């Protein structure tokens, strides 16, 4: 049974289907393999979309219904649709990887399905049975499998963006009575246009991303919208991304808004901010904790101050810092700047790059999937 959402959510209970049957309507004229190959030559990130999308509707009377794959295109909504006004919107970020034998896989999707439902509960939206979440991805990737970059194309993959929006036409501030779930797909190269070069980070002192009891642990569009002003401030100061500190004391390092952070010490300790409810529980984050522990490293999930960061780099105890997330995988951090100062990381990023390689090798099927993290799509 799907469980119901947050306290405000009252909806029908529907049986969890073991597999969802999608009605598939293909575009009458599909792009040729040559056209797709040309588009995949340098996809960038998030600018190019495949030919189809998955959709499932929800309303209070019927629960989830009408699962379908249709040609990719605009979704028609009334201007009063709740998502436009009160931002009931959640999403996930995942990737489909082509292996050398042509098969297509994704990584720990059940984690994304679980997190999607945790986000749904926080935003008083209906939960989606995980089988439907997985089936929607499988279905749309099957129809658009020609868009998954080849195994020898470097680090290109098909980025998957499941999301849910409130569609009811109503301006009352309350949970919507109707929702749309969708999965769209975007062939993707490196998240950062500079490729794998260390990123620079700006410490946001005016803005916070999340406070205790807020939506920091949910993957909702509002968190990203509220990060944009600080991101702009970071860019003005010549930085690529922003580091957010805790809302109460402004000294504990939280995350980057789109990525989690790790600090590597010369003595084999690896520290990452603990999940206090204000940080997004990243799937890449939890996978790296496991991979690093398997190497015998002492991975500590704990609160970590901005002063520990500054002092650790200055004393040489911290040798590497990296950020991680589905889109960017693992990115070395090269510089930290704040109002009145900056520091450069001296390290060669050895552990960062080696963990990155290990993770990519698992995802692309070049290394044994000893944790059972891969899920076959096609
Ligand atoms: C991801 O890493 O998939 C994210 O969701 C970060 C960003 C692209 C929103």
Image (cartoon, grey):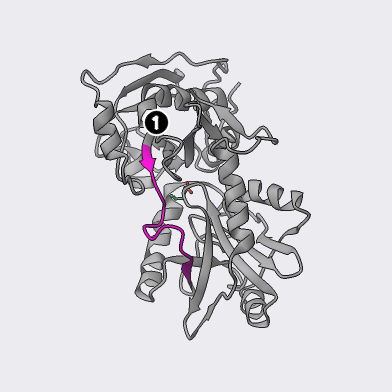
Q: Residue at x 45, y 41 (%)?
A: 91
Residue 312 falls left or right of residue 176: right
In percent of width and height, residue 166 lies at 39, 36
Compared to residue 286, the image places residue 54 above or below, namely: above
Q: Look at the image and give the residue range highlighted in magenta.
A: 186-201
Question: In the current view of this chain or complex, which residue is farthest to the left?
Answer: 29
Q: Which residue is mark 1?
A: 182
In percent of width and height, residue 186 lies at 36, 39
Residue 133 falls left or right of residue 143: right
Residue 48 visible? The answer is: yes
Q: Is 189 included in the stretch rendered in magenta?
A: yes
The reply to whether the residue tagged 1 has its Cβ within 8 angstroms of ligand 1 is: no
Q: Residue at x 57, y 18 (%)?
A: 16
Give the total number of marks visible in the rendering.
1
Q: Residues within 10 Å of mark 1 (few under 14, many from 20)?
A: many
In percent of width and height, residue 354 lies at 62, 55
Q: Residue at x 51, y 39 (%)?
A: 124
Q: Quadrant of the N terminus?
A: top right
In this view, the residue in front, 297 or 254, is: 297
Compared to residue 298, the image places residue 35 above or below, namely: above
Badge 1 marks a residue whose secondary structure is strand
Residue 215 visible? The answer is: no
The chief SS type of the magenta part is: loop
Question: In the current view of this chain or complex, which residue is farthest to the bottom?
Answer: 340
In this view, the residue in front, 346 or 255, is: 346
């Amino acid at each position: 049974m799907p469980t119901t959402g947050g306290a405000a959510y009252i909806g029908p209970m529907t049986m969890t289907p073991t597999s969802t049957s999608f009605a598939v309507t293909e575009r009458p004229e599909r792009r040729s393999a040559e056209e797709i190959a040309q588009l995949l030559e340098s996809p960038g990130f998030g600018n190019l979309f495949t030919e189809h999308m998955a959709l499932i509707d929800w309303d209070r009377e019927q629960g989830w219904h009408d699962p379908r794959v249709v040609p990719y295109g605009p979704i028609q909504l009334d201007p009063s649709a709740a998502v436009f006004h009160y931002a009931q919107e959640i999403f996930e970020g995942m990737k489909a990887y082509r292996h050398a034998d042509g098969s297509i896989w994704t990584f720990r999707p059940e984690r994304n399905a679980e997190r999607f439902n945790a986000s749904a509960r926080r935003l008083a939206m209906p939960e989606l049975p995980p089988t439907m979440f997985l089936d929607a991805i499988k279905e749309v990737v099957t129809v658009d499998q020609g868009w998954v970059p080849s195994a020898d194309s470097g680090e290109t993959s098909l980025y998957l963006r499941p999301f849910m929006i409130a569609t009811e036409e109503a301006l009352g501030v309350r949970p919507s009575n109707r929702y749309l779930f969708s999965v769209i797909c975007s062939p993707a190269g490196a998240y950062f246009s500079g490729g794998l070069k260390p990123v620079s980070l700006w410490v946001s002192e005016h803005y916070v991303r999340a406070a205790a009891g807020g939506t920091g642990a949910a993957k909702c569009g509002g968190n990203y919208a509220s990060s944009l002003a600080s991101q702009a401030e970071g860019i003005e100061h010549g930085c690529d991304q922003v580091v957010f500190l805790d809302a109460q004391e402004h000294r504990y390092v939280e995350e980057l808004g789109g990525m989690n952070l790790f600090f590597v010490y010369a003595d084999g300790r690896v520290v990452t901010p603990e999940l206090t409810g204000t940080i997004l529980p990243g799937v890449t984050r939890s996978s790296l904790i496991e991979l690093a522990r398997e190497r015998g490293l002492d991975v500590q999930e704990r609160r970590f101050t901005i002063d520990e960061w500054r002092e650790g780099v200055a004393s040489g105890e911290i040798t590497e810092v990296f950020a991680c997330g589905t889109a960017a995988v693992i990115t070395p951090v090269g510089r930290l700047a704040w109002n009145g100062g900056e520091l450069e990381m001296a390290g060669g990023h050895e552990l960062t790059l080696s963990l990155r390689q290990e993770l990519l090798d698992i995802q692309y099927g070049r290394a044994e999937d000893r944790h059972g993290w891969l899920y076959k799509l096609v």
